[in-house]
Image: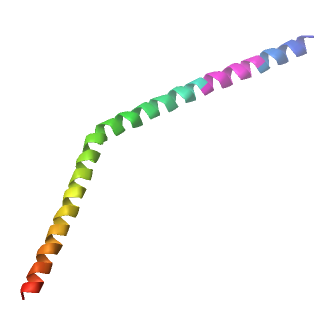
């Protein structure tokens, strides 16, 4: 009977250690996710500015193309 009891304690101890490891992993994963979310929040204004600059560059390129066409027609 003592063999069965030791086996049961060993199995319970193993399961307990695996649970502790799983909780530690989940905590670390949550912390990494929180870090990524914080970085994304910080980068949002930069991304918005970049989008505005891109739109302005497209408009400037169109204006430049029109100017070049007018200059070419005048020559």
Question: Which residue is nearer to you in this view: 13 or 69?
Answer: 69
Query: Where are the magenta residues, as a range?
Result: 12-22
Q: Residue at x 11, y 85 (%)?
A: 73
Residue visible at 22% across and 63% down? 58
In the image, is 48 to the left or to the right of 34?
A: left
Question: Considering depth in this image, is 18 or 58 the residue closer to the camera?
Answer: 58
Give above or below for 41 relative to 5.
below
Looking at the rendering, which quadrant does residue 4 occupy? top right
Pick the residue in front: 62 or 37.
62
Residue sitting at the far left: 74
Compared to residue 10, the image places residue 54 above or below, namely below
Answer above or below: position of 17 versus 44: above
Please identify the quarter of the rendering in which residue 23 is found: top right
Seen from this angle, which residue lies furthest bottom?
75
Q: Percent x, y for residue 18?
A: 67, 25
Label the magenta part by its dominant secondary structure: helix
The vertical placement of 46 against 9, above or below, is below
């Amino acid at each position: 009977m003592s063999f069965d009891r030791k086996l049961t304690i060993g199995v319970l101890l193993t399961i307990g250690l695996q649970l502790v490891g799983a909780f530690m992993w989940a905590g670390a994963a949550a912390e990494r996710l929180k870090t990524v979310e914080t970085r994304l929040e910080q980068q949002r204004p930069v991304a918005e500015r970049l989008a505005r600059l891109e739109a302005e560059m497209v408009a400037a390129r169109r204006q430049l193309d029109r100017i070049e066409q007018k200059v070419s027609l005048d020559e």
